[in-house]
Amino acid sequence: MKQISHEEFKPAPLKRSILLVCSPLQSPGSLGSLCRTAEAFGVEQLLIHQSNIDFLKLPRFIKTSRHSFKNIHIDSYDNLILLIEKLKEKDHLILGLEHCDQSNNLKSFRSQKKVAIIIGNEKSGIERSILDKTDAVAHIEMYGKNSSMNVTQATAIALYHCANFM
């Protein structure tokens, strides 16, 4: 058995348009990991808060992203509520990734629409005012005693689901 090289790798065909919308983040390392994960799942566009633009120049972001930022369209926004309204006008399903009292298990989501996944801050998650503007909120079913998951790992699970099962 031989490991596939970067030159031999052939990506799977994309089944849908997926956008990843990041709430303001605290760490350039988190953004780098999210960028790498988003690129791996064929995310069409990574939308980051204006306050995180400078992260894109930092060595921690560049190292953690493993230069995936060269293969994905990254854009910024300054008002998430206005961005959500614009995405809805373009017929995107707005899906918040957060465990809350009205969220449903991620595996239950199916949609033919384009999807924009909103992910929260590493510590505080998605603000309630943003959750109220989503079309749906999904959580990842967990089996351990911990009540939360790292934002990058949770995003990877959500992107896998959206890319393969929605």
Image (tube, rainbow, N blue to C red):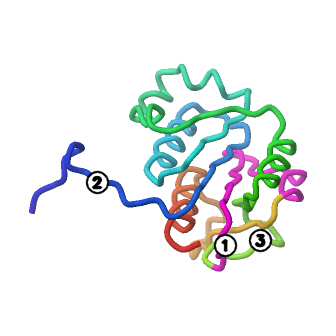
Mark 1 or 2, nearer chain start? 2
Task: Assess disc 3: are there few (<14), some (14-19) or many (≥20) residues with their C-alpha within 10 Å of its C-alpha.
Answer: some
1 or 3: mark nearer the eye:
1
Tag 1–tag 3 contact (CB < 8 Å): no
Disc 1 element: loop
Q: In which image quadrant can residue 155 be found?
A: bottom right
Q: What amino acid is labelled 2 in the image?
A: Lys
Task: Assess disc 2: are there few (<14), some (14-19) or many (≥20) residues with their C-alpha within 10 Å of its C-alpha.
Answer: few
Residue ID for mark 1: 111
Residue 11 vertical position relative to residue 136 in the rendered view, above or below: above
Left/right of residue 97 with respect to residue 61 in the rendered view: right
As drawn, the residue found furthest toward the left would be 1
Mark 3 or 2, nearer chain start? 2
Residue ID for mark 3: 103
Q: Which residues are magenta?
A: 108-133
Task: Assess disc 1: are there few (<14), some (14-19) or many (≥20) residues with their C-alpha within 10 Å of its C-alpha.
Answer: few
Q: What amino acid is labelled 3 in the image?
A: Ser
Left/right of residue 3 with respect to residue 29 in the rendered view: left
Tag 1–tag 2 contact (CB < 8 Å): no
Residue at 66%, 45% in the rendered image = 122
Residue ID for mark 2: 10
Q: Nearer the viewer, residue 165 or 100?
A: 165
